[in-house]
Amino acid sequence: MTNTQERYRFHLIQAFSLPETAQYKLRSMSGTKEQAMMNYQDVAHLLADTNWDLHVGALATHGDWPVETREEFMMVGVNRLPLVRQACLSKKYNGIVLLGGGDPGFAESREIGRRFGVPVTSCAHSQMHIATMLGNRFSIIDISETHNMRMHDLVIQYRFGNNCASIRNINFPLPRPPYEEGFKLQDQRDKGLRGERSDMLEAAIVESLIAIEEDGAEVLILGCSAAFWMRPLIQRRLHEAGWDVPVLEGYSSAIEHLKLLVNLNLDASSLAFPVDHPKKWRRRKFI
Amino acid sequence: MTNTQERYRFHLIQAFSLPETAQYKLRSMSGTKEQAMMNYQDVAHLLADTNWDLHVGALATHGDWPVETREEFMMVGVNRLPLVRQACLSKKYNGIVLLGGGDPGFAESREIGRRFGVPVTSCAHSQMHIATMLGNRFSIIDISETHNMRMHDLVIQYRFGNNCASIRNINFPLPRPPYEEGFKLQDQRDKGLRGERSDMLEAAIVESLIAIEEDGAEVLILGCSAAFWMRPLIQRRLHEAGWDVPVLEGYSSAIEHLKLLVNLNLDASSLAFPVDHPKKWRRRKFI
Amino acid sequence: MTNTQERYRFHLIQAFSLPETAQYKLRSMSGTKEQAMMNYQDVAHLLADTNWDLHVGALATHGDWPVETREEFMMVGVNRLPLVRQACLSKKYNGIVLLGGGDPGFAESREIGRRFGVPVTSCAHSQMHIATMLGNRFSIIDISETHNMRMHDLVIQYRFGNNCASIRNINFPLPRPPYEEGFKLQDQRDKGLRGERSDMLEAAIVESLIAIEEDGAEVLILGCSAAFWMRPLIQRRLHEAGWDVPVLEGYSSAIEHLKLLVNLNLDASSLAFPVDHPKKWRRRKFI
Amino acid sequence: MTNTQERYRFHLIQAFSLPETAQYKLRSMSGTKEQAMMNYQDVAHLLADTNWDLHVGALATHGDWPVETREEFMMVGVNRLPLVRQACLSKKYNGIVLLGGGDPGFAESREIGRRFGVPVTSCAHSQMHIATMLGNRFSIIDISETHNMRMHDLVIQYRFGNNCASIRNINFPLPRPPYEEGFKLQDQRDKGLRGERSDMLEAAIVESLIAIEEDGAEVLILGCSAAFWMRPLIQRRLHEAGWDVPVLEGYSSAIEHLKLLVNLNLDASSLAFPVDHPKKWRRRKFI
Amino acid sequence: MTNTQERYRFHLIQAFSLPETAQYKLRSMSGTKEQAMMNYQDVAHLLADTNWDLHVGALATHGDWPVETREEFMMVGVNRLPLVRQACLSKKYNGIVLLGGGDPGFAESREIGRRFGVPVTSCAHSQMHIATMLGNRFSIIDISETHNMRMHDLVIQYRFGNNCASIRNINFPLPRPPYEEGFKLQDQRDKGLRGERSDMLEAAIVESLIAIEEDGAEVLILGCSAAFWMRPLIQRRLHEAGWDVPVLEGYSSAIEHLKLLVNLNLDASSLAFPVDHPKKWRRRKFI
Amino acid sequence: MTNTQERYRFHLIQAFSLPETAQYKLRSMSGTKEQAMMNYQDVAHLLADTNWDLHVGALATHGDWPVETREEFMMVGVNRLPLVRQACLSKKYNGIVLLGGGDPGFAESREIGRRFGVPVTSCAHSQMHIATMLGNRFSIIDISETHNMRMHDLVIQYRFGNNCASIRNINFPLPRPPYEEGFKLQDQRDKGLRGERSDMLEAAIVESLIAIEEDGAEVLILGCSAAFWMRPLIQRRLHEAGWDVPVLEGYSSAIEHLKLLVNLNLDASSLAFPVDHPKKWRRRKFI
């Protein structure tokens, strides 16, 4: 254990990639791994003790815009599975992080990872688990009606229904043809990070405050990776307003969650993620 | 409404198709629609007032064996989505039935159907809804460890956790390389339907009885379409044993569920299955 | 199955009847079955393939006004049971619909029907089941404080507590001595159906919007049969406001629910509705 | 408060009465109030500080046998309501106890009592409330399949689903034509109280032990008033077996529950049991 | 039973005592037992048939101010346990009331009492149990942020999560160095009881109304013993506003709850509060 | 971040200490920190990158035996709080681990830690959180009836009721006067670690298997720190039996949980653990 660089050999896989020429893309698909990773500055210190690779994601087959609908989430989810299997087969990694907000292909990736003993974490799942370590109820600050319902599905699937105070929609949908407004998103981010007024950030602040004061949220998490950049800014603004409430985002949560699993030599229970023809099987399962 | 044949214009879509030469296939992929539909005799009377087409399913991309793992369910689910969209676009149908036990691609298909006002039903979802009309708790009689956990996922997603008494594993996995035992399944079915002793049926009877007597099930449903043939036989055997307990299977449940939706001119709530950029959006969602 | 008129032989039973001279009555107790059925125009197309009889309901013993309190619901419920038994004994019917909003005598009628293998459906029960097929949570738009609590009781008994976003009171109580205001109800209905401004309808629209925007309702159902006339009007107004949310009412829901049960040859589980001295009994029941 | 006889002026109302000549009756309908009350010896000390009357119950209209089915419970429930109202109108009483195991007419009686400020208690309801004061989960030891499902309904309606470990059936149904076996019940009671072997008591002991050891019950309650006599005997036998588990029965529970309410000047919330046309009404109710 | 003074031999134990010289104390620690008991006039009639002693509470070790934080509640809780044991050992009492709002040391005191067969009640626990006898959901009107979270903990531990509509903060924290504002509390009480305007009472009225109209509370309970004096005043004000909603406070609830237990000869289930090395043990516990 | 020894500055605090001469003690209270920590060999690799101190625990005031009852847990809990505060005040640590099985003083320690921004973890809490990352339901393998109910309390308080399949009692109580059998515990441990037959380990294996096969556990956790030594042995034995189920213990779970919090710069939400007189307060809390 003298060399922690050896301890964490992580493969980070983006949800999907778009052609560099795609009009509606939100992030760079090329350059160094640091450049290809959104908000790298926010997680650099967490990756410092980690030997990590980044895959820019399988080329999208649903179109050349980011995913928001259930159908799109399923399509990029399926496309990501071969990458997960390859990473496991390569034996280069002892953990995989699925980047992206709505966890496309996560349950299926865990099933694959289970066969190799390789833990897999993902942004919404890790945020929800960590949020319940900190307070009784969390709210999800999220970007659009369709994305909200994806998050809704995940809260149900991950069984955090009793812990979720609300999902709050700031209504800044992802870029998508034929809508021009989607382009606002990057603009909003740039302004926000430069310290200028960002309507998107302001909307997130408003919904965060209502989540705390009305819905009973004691922790906030962010739904879409295109909103993760706001984490430190929301945190600071809430603090200035007198609310000492943790705000999480997905990348850091998934990375640290993975380290915990690697250190404890855990991935998932074979009973929850069985292989076909397991040595032992149960006659009865409860919900 | 004088002609009920006009009332129901249904498209039935199999979960996937395998090459006719596939060693591990469980059903015919060719012939008439009646021949291509497993256990047609059990639903013929329900389709009699219906104008229906059958699609044998998209050619499987996961391998040439039936689906059982989460990964396989996701892959065939994605492959089915274009067929759903085409059916909607064709304007030939006022309802779509997704055949197959574990509902691959169901939520995504409903999302597509919603945009066209076309209701979509699926075998597990319909069975669970109908089961709760009949009794307080249902058990799922199901075939294998991996398939059980798919059903488990669906119970959670469909929010029937409080109504599900148990999932019972009879341990007759689907055929899959390199296992020879999977071939038992068809053999078991043939024997059972001929009135000979079928170990699979006997296992299902045993688990059904325990589900009733131990787990508190008041209704039974069947998990995998490869087990649907047992419905009338289990029903009769339970009746002979003195238990007057409804036993459901997926095809009949999904077909009649769809008729109900068509007659009431319903498909799904736009709030549960929103389109992108909807006219109205909600600031807050609860779980 | 060539003659669907033979398929559905339904007996529709009103909740109660009042003397034709009753000052506080809301509907006609005489005339043809079509005249005696409120809002017949809304369900005529659903009854077209059905061979149906209507019973105007047992003469009320609680007074000559419509039911609203728990006591009144119990009294008309008991009075309806002999009609259900007679209908079953007559062997003329393969299904019974209990008309009326608060389901008086429903569980008891199902128990009777179970002994004859005759399915029984009722307006609140069917609406709640269908609502959960369409969205995650429903709200009940309802007429008065006492009626609200009857609906509240039903949500609990039918175990839809997790699916009910709220019960919303538009505060248009049923006519009852010595209150004059109850007479408004019919007036409001007439105005509403003529396309004039109806305060009752306006109140229902307001509460529907709040149910959607504040309470998280994704489907709306109507509590009292005296409010069922508003279904198409609320639906249209919500649509005009940009909300594509299903609105249900009781008669159509109960009729189509019954068809589903008849087609699948189902009524209820004997374990949920046991006969006395059943052949088999369970040592243990769970909740 | 010097005279506690003045403090408690209670009216105890039996669930129903049968003609003295009824072949299937379980208790005397005549004699002194002490004679007409089953197991008076078990509650005499609790009534000693109480000024109490007993009504033998309205004459049964369902038949001349005890109630067990949902239909019968509803019929005797309705018959009891006028007695409740008369008791309230008489102003002689400051509390009403509904005797009998399955609480027929309880919710409706509370509604009536609420209008007069007179608290009403009932045997199952009081037992469940007191049971949850003592331990985390209770089981119901009960007599027959149909009666079990009545108790099941009550657990749901009273919202004790999370506290009910199980309902256990000892299968000693009430007397009812044409069954001879029902006559066993009185015989079993006589034997049990005389200290002879009673199969009914032995069955109750067996189910009580399983409820504790298998189902997780920490308190036991009794379902049917025809089983209340077993309370001290079960208690003693469990104690002898080393289990120090409280066993409740209905009469004592309902009487002491009522004293608590009288002393605190409470009956029920008007929001849970509203009158028609209340001064204030709520726009929204939650479940 | 001729002498009810003999029936109830109660020991009432305050949560803690402060030195008479303590600047931040809220109540007298000396004088007669009637003087040492806050709001004695509100419970005098309930104690009239009771032979009771009062212990002013163990001298506080956390500081010379009232308790509000979790740490302080734990410290006074531990200090109270020897008093509970002494009271049991003295054999003078057949019941113990733990005075004070947040139930410090309650579960542990019940464990001690169980060994002696002596029931123990406490203010929050008794209020919650009684509240659910009266309506579906209660709200807690409480004084400060930290105290609110103590009440939150208790709602969870007592398993009333489904019955608690909300905890409402009127923000009148207890006196505590270095804050001067805490002194308001006594002042507010004096004004309120004299019939003058009390900001604390006004805040409680506002929050009570919102609890009823927005949160769905059907019963109100009070969190902190320093707020118990408001019970009759809130009750009256709500009544004047047209809301007939029960308002509870802790002392009367705990006293009457204890009488019920004494009369039924109950304290707690040994399975919920086991002794070490019990005669019988369970292999399995459920939650 | 070049020196991870600087990253983690942890203070580990035992639940309590007993005099070295105590007859009933289970572990050494002196020697090096490695010697004073039970099963150090199981966590040595996790502490290797950590700069850690160990406090042997406050001297027990309840007696000279290990804690098992609720009262004892409360007493040692209170005694630990000053140690937590001192550790925070010293500014030497960025995280605190509370050693010991039943989490004495955990919520209160978090409250203290929150004021200093120092995260605190504890053995049961961390195990439950990590267990739910791995599977749907966990069982707790635990040592005695009283300790079981402490674990039961914790499951409720931490809100893992829906995730806890069962608590299983292997019935090896801690040493306690006057019982001799408690001495078995150390003997059982020694035998088990030497690879000889240990009845305690065998009992744990049996209960683990039943938890998996009957109760539906998908992950196992250990209740008492005196059972933590069995973790690798149970894990191996289950694996040999064909069950690939994660088994957790408290020390490793709490240590890695703490690292995650430190890395993410998190401790707890101020809304869940408020300070007195916070800058902002909420009018309403939900459960």
Image: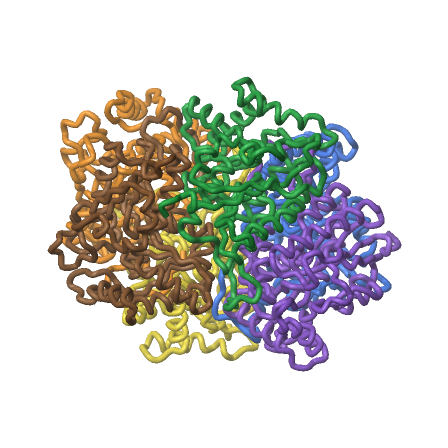
Chain colours: A purple, B green, C brown, D orange, E yellow, F blue
User: Measured along the vertical axis of the image, is residue E83 above or below residue C285?
Assistant: below
Q: Quadrant of residue F6?
A: bottom right
Q: Is residue B113 left or right of residue D60?
A: right
- In percent of the image, x 16 and y 50: which residue is there? C30
- In percent of the image, x 14 and y 27: which residue is there? D21
In percent of width and height, residue B84 lies at 58, 50
**Count of marks overlaid on the render:** 0
Q: Quadrant of residue A35?
A: bottom right
Q: Residue furthest left?
A: C21
Q: Residue furthest right?
A: A2
Q: Is residue C171 left or right of residue A50?
A: left
In percent of width and height, residue E199 lies at 40, 78
Of residues F209 and A45, which is closer to you in this image? A45
In percent of width and height, residue E273 lies at 50, 43
Q: Quick check: can you spot residue D257?
A: yes
Of residues B284 and A146, which is closer to you in this image? A146
Q: Residue furthest top?
A: B196
User: Measured along the vertical axis of the image, is residue C110 above or below residue A109?
Assistant: above
Of residues B71 and E78, which is closer to you in this image? B71
User: Measured along the vertical axis of the image, is residue E262 above or below residue F53?
Assistant: above
Q: Quick check: can you spot residue D242?
A: no
Of residues E155 and C258, which is closer to you in this image? C258
- In percent of the image, x 58 and y 62: which residue is there? A146
In percent of width and height, residue F274 lies at 57, 67
Q: Residue furthest bottom?
A: A196
Q: Is residue C99 left or right of residue F103?
A: left
